Amino acid sequence: MKKIISSAVTALLLPAVANAEWTKSYVIEWNEPAMYFGGVDGSITNPGKDCPKGVNPELDWIKVLTNAGYSEEEAKWIRNPANPTRSPVHGQNQVAFRGKDRANVYVHPESYPDPGLYPMEGQVAEGLNLDGDDSTGLTSPAGKKGIDNVFYETLGCWKSYRGPERLSSGALQFNDAMRNGAWTTVVVVHGRGKDPLNDNNVEVGFYLSDDDMVKGGNGEIAPDYTFVVKPDAKYEAIFKAKTENGVIKTKKPSEQVMLRDPGYTRDLELLDAQLELVMNEDGTLRGYVGGYRPWMKVYQGWVDARGPVIEALTWVELPAVYYALKRTADYKPKGAKGPNTHISYALRIDAIPAYVMSPDAHNQVAKIKSYKALVDEPPQVARATRFRVIDGLVPLPDKSLKYGPDVDVFASRKTN
Amino acid sequence: MSRHLEKKGFSRRSVLRGGLRGMLGGTAVSLGLPILDILLDENGKAFADGAALPTRFGSYFWGLGLTDTPAGGTRWVPEKTGFGYDIKPELESIAHLKDKVSVFSGYRAITDGKANLVHWSGHASILSGAAPGANGRFDAPSFDTKIADAIGGSSRYKMINVDASTSRQPVSYSTRSGTTFASPEVTPLGLYMRLFGDGFQDPNSDNWQPDPSIMLRQSVLSAVKDQRHALMKSVGKEDQIRLDQYFTSLRELENQLEVQLQRPEKCEACVIPDAPKETPPSASIEVVNANTKVMARLLAMGLACNQSRVFNFVHTAGTSETYIGGQSKIYHQITHDEPTDATLGYQPITSQLAGMVMQGFGDFLTEFENIKEGDGTLLDNCLIMGFSDTGYAKIHSIDNIPMFFAGSAGGRHKAGQHVHTTGESVTRVSLTAMQIMGAPVGEFGQGTMKTANPVSEVMA
């Protein structure tokens, strides 16, 4: 249960640098894709206004494989837990080779017919009005028109994303990792006016910190701890904004920002990025950061998370995700030609008061600026993974066990 | 009792030494006996000659945790703390022993910014006290080795490692170096042969003689002692480190041989079991649990026969390969892909499997409970620490990792309690185990998990 602090006490406790100018600082204790849950009983799988058919159902792998040309006997052996080519950790690599001419469907999704995803059919969505047009998009739970969140419309009935707030499997998995130290993101808000609640000259900075969040006795992240900014060449976002009645809104979209993604893609790259964050009386900060993210990187993130594992655990065929994102992408950079390359998206964040210090830890961060110039090391081109993933697959340690487009599926049975 | 036995022609000495003796097909055979009142002091707490009944330590590991979800559906954490705790569904298998089992809930592994290496960081933290930096290795020795150093030297094997999981690779989490893990026995027959095959010396035999082959091997080792020292002086520092590691293992072998050259203490609970039959290689839960039961029986008797005082037992690996026979989905997959039932608040099939896995633990403890020793049971003279790699397996959580102490460790463990915290380090429980077992350890763990604060509530 969240700690509730009275507003009067909050005024005294909030980490702030006093002056005419004002600064508030926070640490993000939870963030997840803004996927409005329209279920009626909390069930992820049952139908709701968002997903009238529920989530995409569990795959019938025998059917999937036989449709792809495997015999039923081959399919059953591929799926048998005793098959030595089926790793209990990394899944069964052979399932990748179900495209045309046994192509790897993760790398060549278009070699495989679109299996389809259950569409999100509701009219309510969380997020931001990215294009400023009230006539496009959906309606927020509070009734605001023009919410642009095609990412949600496309993937909202995928089991990974569907669920009540803080309870979808993806949100739980990545936030648990974040809260246990995988990464920390701090937020600093600085204004030049006298009234933090109504200030036309505000900046907001998102930075990484190497300091872990601390859990209190109730298991929740404790407020008012200190975090030192860790300059990062990649993960930093700065917004020009204003406040209206305690709500921080972007004045002009930031051309491009990068946040740490609570998902397999890891990089949350947003074009035309905007935000809308509420400074609550209890000292917390809650709202959305949104923009247009490159959909192909989203797809690739899922592939790199090991295609067979993702398909088995999340009940979708990855080519369906590829086709759906490609089909619904609603944005491309200005001047770019060809099909849309980006999809509208919003991240919901919950942040609590924290003290944020400059990288040298000498001073509390009072103003917003970029720290990228302090980074000695060039940004990582590719992230290190715990597994060696090639084309969505983890090679088997026993090289005598074969899988692939030309393999005799039953050869592994002979070695068992 | 003793006068009755003597009237029948048994002396305490003869029973102590050999149990029952006879001829079978022209060959002399002996059958050990349980510890009888005749052999003990008036309180049944020690042998009549004053020697205390030995206390043993074991770890029992299973993969994929137990069910305690953010939606509020705990299936294992008792509501009541202290003695007389309530039994939740996934702990039904230990209900009959709950007065001998302490439950620890709410403890967590703290990675200090290192990644949560799924199905690895949790038990690595419990065992080594350090969040590991990489999969497949620990950043410090596992603490069972410290207990083995403290109490394991007087038995034939300083430590026995057993893996009942029938995984594709043998599974052991016991390590001195952090990089090399012990080689476990992976079949019941292999365990039997290790404990009761070649080299086994019946502790109750009247005709005990030092094994000439052991004498020879020891003399060989002793013979190269001077050359070892000379070699150490003649090589560089890196090679000295390598040689030191090698000779350390040799020294342990020497110690083991030395034990075997001494007349073993009587172990009247020791009854040499029959060799088990080979079992089919399968990771199905039915086979794994059957393996667990058979191997527990062998292991328990091995302890009763003083072949070792320390063991590590793996039921299923962190990345468990087990499944319900005939089904195509493995338990590991189900923990991740099964949706939480909104009404129940938990994953029903996952919880069912967790209960089946815990049946293995219940059966394991029962085998120890079935061996009478002194005025109690073998379990009473053990501390068996059960634990897993994760809390809520669906998300690889390392919060609220289930941990248990079974057995009263000869009275040193105030068993039968539920101790609950909200987020304290798992290393507190590990340190408690070490201190109960008499390992000379004042603190344990690294970084935030470093602690000098055992769980005193359970320490007598």
Image: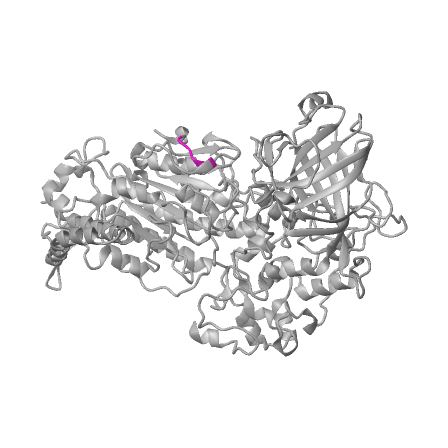
Asked if residue A2 lies left or right of residue B104, the reply is right
In the foreground, B419 or A404: A404
Q: Is residue B11 visible?
A: no
In this rendering, the count of numbered labels is 0
Residue depicted at 46% across the width and 53% down the height: B135
Q: Does any portion of residue A18 appear in the rendered image? A: yes
Kindly indicate the quadrant of the structure image that contains residue B219: bottom left
Span of residues in magenta:
B448-452
Side (left or right) of B268 relative to A31: left
- The picture places residue A331, in percent across and down from the top left corner, at 80, 57
Please state the horizontal and vertical placement of residue B139, each as a whole percent of the image: 41, 46
Residue A392 within the magenta-colored segment of the rendering: no
- Most distant residue in the right direction: A135
Identify the residue at horizontal 68%, vertical 27% (top origin): A4
Q: Position of residue B237 (x, y in %)?
A: 27, 50
Q: Is residue B449 magenta?
A: yes
